[in-house]
Image (cartoon, coloured by chain):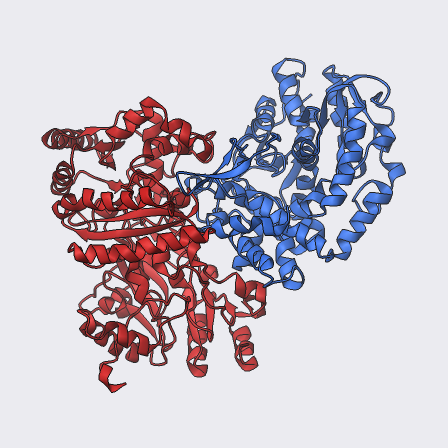
Amino acid sequence: MAIKEYRDMQKRCSSCNFCKWIPFDKVKSARFAENCPAQAYYQYNGYSARGRFQLGLCLVNDELEPAGETQKVIQSCLSCGACDVACKICRYNLEPLEHNLELKREVVRAGNETAVQKNMRANLMSEHTMLAGKKKEDRDAWAEGLGLIDARKEACEALFFPGCQYAYNRPEEARKAVQVLQRAGVKVGYLFEDDACCGGRMHQMGMQEDFEAAAKANIRHFDAVSADYIVTPCGDCYHALKRRYAEQGLAKKVLHLTEVLAALIEEGRLVFTKRVEKTVTYHDPCHLGRLGEGYEPWNGKEVKIRSQIVTWEPRRPRYNGIHGVYDAPRKILEAIPGVTLVEMERIREYSFCCGAGGGCTELDPELSKWTAAERMEEAKATGASAVVTACPWCVSNLSAAESGMEVTDILTLVCEAL
Amino acid sequence: MALDRAVYKRLQEIVGERWVSEDPVHLETYRCASVQTASHYGPYDNRTPVPQAVVLPSTTEEVQQIVRLCNEYKIGFKASTTFWAAAGYVGDDNSIQLDMRRMNKWEIDPRNQIAVMEPYAIAAQIQAEAMKHGLTCAITGAGCSTSILASTAGWNGGGPSTISMGNNHDNLLGAEWVLANGEIVRLGSLGSGSGWFSGEGPLFSARAILRGAQGMGGDMGVCTRIATKLSPWPGPDHLPTYGDAPAYKADLPDNFRAYTICFPSWDAWARGYTAFYDNEIIYLGHRQFNMFGRDLKAAMIKIITNSEAQLADLNTLLEDPETQRQNADMKIDTQIVIVGMTERDLAWKEAALDEILADVGAHKSEMMLTKEMVDYTLAYLIRMGHKNLNYVYAGSYEGNMAWSSNVFVDAEWMETVVALKKKWEDEHDYFARVGGDSGLGSMTRAGGGGSTGFEFFIHYDGSDLHSVQGTRKYMDYTPIWMKEHGFGQDLGRVNDTARREDGYSYTQEEHNKLFYGTPAAHLMKYQWKMRELMNPNHLGGTYYRTLDPDYRPDAE
């Protein structure tokens, strides 16, 4: 869709500004009531979903160009989807997140990508990863000696998709993830040198063609594999595969590692033997939580019923975050002896982003760092000694906030308790 | 027209470079496209003018410096908080927009049961903080996303809580106000150095200058801090909710009850309301869900209380005989919340309610008695966090046929008004066909009870010119119809005189022509004098209407 196809939606935004806050029924304090990091940090209206609708309308009307300060505003969106959930408390016919993503695509269409974006693309094309400085030939070093099934040659139960963060920056955790699955008797396969970046952050940054190219290449490999499901420990990859790859035609079942582990615990295939005396709070990664809903194909059109009620025919799938992955990680934490979970105020579908979404760690590091610090303030307010999460991007960004509070991957706790 | 460089530099010095901008992206995102909001606050087809700069002050002193600068250079200014209504946006080409977001501090004083707050402390935040102290605040019908300061000091402030907590403008205590001429005035007890606790005095007070029933629409300076009265909250220290978005529900203790009352006639409705007033049993009262329309409300309630449902399910639900029966049952309805401060209190209120219902032949809607419906109604009316379901159908709504009067007068006319709207719905496709009656309103417009107030929601599509123009035709017709039928002025078009259709403020000459010879002329002349005193350079908009006392039409 081009931005002009969003014109009606832009004009149907009611200026209610619900998009700036968590769902109001969930407000427990004045301090942690806002939901949009970009809006909360930069404060000007343009940074909100409502402002972005207005901005988008100006692009459609040729009143603004997707360059300069306008581009900065557009690219400050963390694509975290918090505005989308809040908007849909009262609206059934607006899609703020999809509109925000379309604005980013408009920047790319206009040829105004930043040098950072160009470098990421170049890296993805040559090295099959967007992580700067990382090489293709080093990608599967983490898997050495694990006895992984070569999924290209042999059937497996779970096709392990580590994602770039685990493959390059957290190889030990990647190994642990596989070892935990193997310990529970899961036959884990891997693509070895055919494993590549999911390209999800390209999608989040509006680089749609690059994302689709990456997706199609990966889907070809996935399709050739005989596996019951694909499992990834990364929240970003999970969203890419579960939702965006499905849009591109991926039919395979996709699970996050926490979903598999929770099921293994429930089946008694994974038993904790050690106590981990710790009070923790859980950070819901945006792309695992509210953006972790599965894709449902739909082919229909907008219609008006009863003269002016705008809806779709046939009934259109509604993505408002409620079917994301929230319970599985919490079940794991509850199952670990000694662990006490205390919740932050902003959780589940109205969780606050860690600051790593939308490529902002690279495109707007100042905002990204502030967002992480803001989230850590909320975590500290719970009295917990550690923040646990289930996405390496969140672990990395929250750790970078240097709050003095421990930030840990849920996998680490699992391994401590086994 | 760019701002004089010297002015821009001074603004940067006042608030810091980060907090002032004249970049087109920021100027354009501070414009109100009025078809996207309630257009009785502004024009239909046009956006408000482009401000020359957007400024985000953080203190009263900064606001004062900005206002003084504006007076020095004769630059207009408008302050706003949540940017929902057109009243908050600039009205001419030589104005700057003040975004008050950075002024969001608040303080709860539990001992005196008051809250002191800056402009961008919204109702949801204040209520959440007050609940920790066993208190709550009045939340207007406009919902908890709104600034309490805005409705208290500058606009209207009635809603479901009016009956037990008063309107926000009734609850105004001390206030700090930067006049449009740059002076700082402190009202109520604050003005006599006695703190925030009282809006009137001790002894002397200028409260009445700041506002009457209708505020000044932000035209006469910037209110930077106010105190408001809080009310007892006999519930837990936060709103305990459950369920999935968007159908959150409140799981409150048993001393909270929510009912949808169904009346057999408008006369019974009026008698029921007056009995509610007389017996003081209602905590929250609003004819709320009828905003979806008489024919659609039961189906819509089923949609909004089910996280998996959506508008595409509406037609199927409308065909369901059980839903049709439930809908017919609540044809003339209202939602109420009853709260017991003690067990005896609750028992008495329940008994009184039952007796009133028996007296007038009303009953409680069975559909709305299930735990889920009760809990949804509680969450809705206590927090008012779903208020923007006003926009659910197509993104825009208009309120018209609005009047505030004795309930028996309302009762006499209600079906006539419904028939008119239904006729337009049936004969045209300008706005949603909902069964005519979409009257929504607070149980009372006065604390404790008294006159009620309704507006009829017209749901239209702001992106569809046919819908916009057709709605406008209806909106233009209804005030004429109302005048002919003795209703007086319609809220739906009352702001015709506040902002021109092109989004700009009126000139004084235009206001003179509009008000000369009207019943309100003497008031507008008085307001002219007030403005000359407090805003000699005419730097606000024209929501504060004025008539030049020396104006004579034949002088032209």
Residue drawn at x 23%, y 50% as measured from the top left? B166
Outermost residue, top direction? A268
User: Visible in this render: residue A376?
Assistant: no
In the picture provided, is B359 more to the left or to the right than B198? left
- Residue A418: which quarter of the image? top right
Q: Is residue A31 above or below residue A390?
A: below
In the picture provided, is B411 more to the left or to the right than A131? left
Tell me the quadrant of the picture where the N terminus of chain A can be found: top right
Outermost residue, bottom direction? B555
Pinpoint residue B386: horizontal percent, then vertical percent.
39, 42
Pinpoint residue A65: horizontal percent, then vertical percent.
64, 62
Pinpoint residue B409: horizontal percent, then vertical percent.
13, 48
- Residue A272: which quarter of the image? top right
Q: Is residue A136 above or below residue B122?
A: above
Residue drawn at x 17%, y 68% as measured from the top left? B203
In the picture provided, is A184 more to the left or to the right than B175? right
In depth, the one of B356 and B323 nearer the eye is: B323
Q: Is residue A144 above or below residue B113?
A: above
- Which chain can be seen in blue? A
- Residue A385: which quarter of the image? top right
In depth, the one of B182 and B354 nearer the eye is: B354
Pinpoint residue A100: horizontal percent, then vertical percent.
60, 49
User: Visible in this render: residue B265?
Assistant: yes
Outermost residue, right direction? A137
In depth, the one of B291 and B190 nearer the eye is: B291
Q: Colour of chain B?
A: red
